[in-house]
Amino acid sequence: MRVEHIALWTHDIDRLRAFYESYFGAQAGPFYRSRTRTAFTSYFLQFPGAGARLELMSTAGLASAPRGPAVGYAHVALAVGSEAAVDALAARLQADGVRIIGAPRRTGDGYYEAVIADPDGNTVEITV
């Protein structure tokens, strides 16, 4: 058994797609527009090295997500291969004005990570 994909709702599917393509090397599959669910669109993003995909979904009438801890998914963690790669990507994101939630560091549970917010405010851990 494996995790096949994780999905995120977004108001701006193209902006979020471009973010994950630009910073994480994601490749978007074909754009999908539902014939039966009015205004539903999506992209599946595949990351280098395979593994689980990220589905970006949009539809009319989305509510904004609550801020702060809440029941449900907390973050997506994307492994970039090395501590140097974590540092370099965090520096690039910061230089580009992306909100850094946690600078690169070793966590108490042994991860080396930086934590950022994607354009919709979703928490993304960048790890080895």
Image (tube, grey):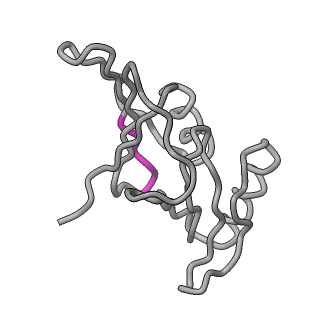
Q: Is residue 81 above or below residue 23?
A: below
Is 21 on the left-hand or right-hand side of 85? left
Is 40 on the left-hand or right-hand side of 98? left
In the picture, residue 2 is in which quadrant? bottom left
The C terminus is located in which quarter? bottom right
Residue shown at 55%/39% (left/top)? Answer: 21
- Viewer-nearest residue: 2 or 108: 108
Is 12 on the left-hand or right-hand side of 39? right
Residue shown at 35%/37% (left/top)? Answer: 44
- Viewer-nearest residue: 109 or 47: 109
Q: Is residue 125 above or below residue 66?
A: below
Residue shown at 57%/38% (left/top)? Answer: 120
The N terminus is located in which quarter? bottom left
- Viewer-nearest residue: 34 or 23: 34
Residue 111 part of the magenta-drawn span: no
Q: Position of residue 96 (x, y in %)?
A: 78, 42
Find the magenta span and give its range.
Answer: 44-49
Q: Position of residue 19 (x, y in %)?
A: 59, 38
Q: Is residue 126 above or below residue 23?
A: below
In the picture, residue 114 is in which quadrant? bottom right
Is 32 on the left-hand or right-hand side of 16? left
Q: Number of labelled discs? A: 0
Q: Position of residue 76 (x, y in %)?
A: 47, 57
